[in-house]
Amino acid sequence: RILIYSRDRSMLDSMHECLKSRNNLLVTAMSTPEAQSLIRNELFGVLVLVGKNDMKPVLDLVRSAHQAPCPPACIIIGINTDRDAIIRALNAGCSYFLDYPRELEKLREIVDGLARKRSGVIPENGHTEGERSVLPIDEELSRRENEILFHLLSGRNNREISNELGISEKTVKNHLWKIYRKFKVESRTQLFNHLLRSCPCMSSFAVKV
């Protein structure tokens, strides 16, 4: 079962056509209250959420989905979104963030992969076998740590991050130490390996180690 949410009818129809198959049961919603009600009262394996400019309704849906007994995977498709929107989406817990229309061709493959992953029996804790969270709930990254992580995943070194954010290299290193501690790793290489193993959305980043 897949819930597709968009406030734009043409986009909703486009997503429906892209994901239509005999294996997918598609449910659509054009309003946030309707989508919230569906998430609370029905079981979905995947949410496909389209956000344009104002991402708050989409992020609210992601947070609601993570309160479900068996949280679905959440894919956000962003239209006219900026870097901060992507960071907020990842921090809210989305599985993938796709840039429309540049990455839209990946959608069907991603949904099929998530469906295969969730096709087994889901235990009472709400996680399929081998699935794990990226961070403990009480170890969320701060806004600054998210910004530094974003630049790390973009391949920037400490000096480049320092120049980009207007902070000293020592401050960058302090934030990196906190990030490593939260992820329980000791180096940049270990951090990348952990993210690539644990968070499917990271597979879309081209990173340099």
Image (tube, rainbow, N blue to C red):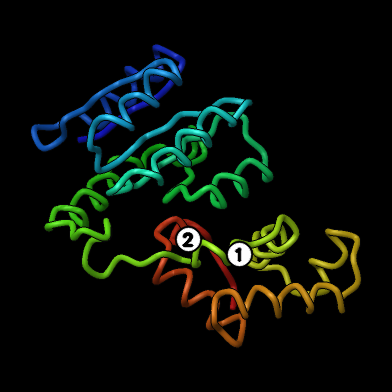
- For residue 153, the mark is 1
Secondary structure under tag 1 reads: helix
In-front residue for pair 64/17 = 64
Q: Quadrant of residue 13?
A: top left
Q: Quadrant of residue 123?
A: bottom left
Relative to residue 80, is residue 130 drawn left or right? left
- For residue 202, the mark is 2
User: Is 130 drawn above or below residue 204 in the view shown?
Assistant: below
Judge the density around disc 1: few (<14), some (14-19), many (≥20) Cα neighbours within 10 Å.
some
- Contact (Cβ within 8 Å) of mark 2 with mark 1: yes
Q: What residue is rendered at 46% in x and 16% in y?
A: 7
Looking at the figure, which quarter contains the N terminus?
Answer: top left
- Looking at the rendered structure, the kind of residue marked 2 is Met
Percent of width and height locating residue 128: 23, 61
Q: Quadrant of residue 22?
A: top left
Q: What residue is rendered at 39% in x and 71% in y?
A: 197
Relative to residue 68, is residue 170 drawn left or right? right
In-front residue for pair 88/123 = 123
- Name the N-terminal-most of marks 2 and 1: 1
In-front residue for pair 22/170 = 170
Q: Kindly give the residue lying farthest to the left in the view shown.
A: 22
User: Is 77 drawn above or below residue 208 in the view shown?
Assistant: above
Looking at the figure, which quarter contains the C terminus?
Answer: bottom right
Percent of width and height locating residue 40: 32, 32
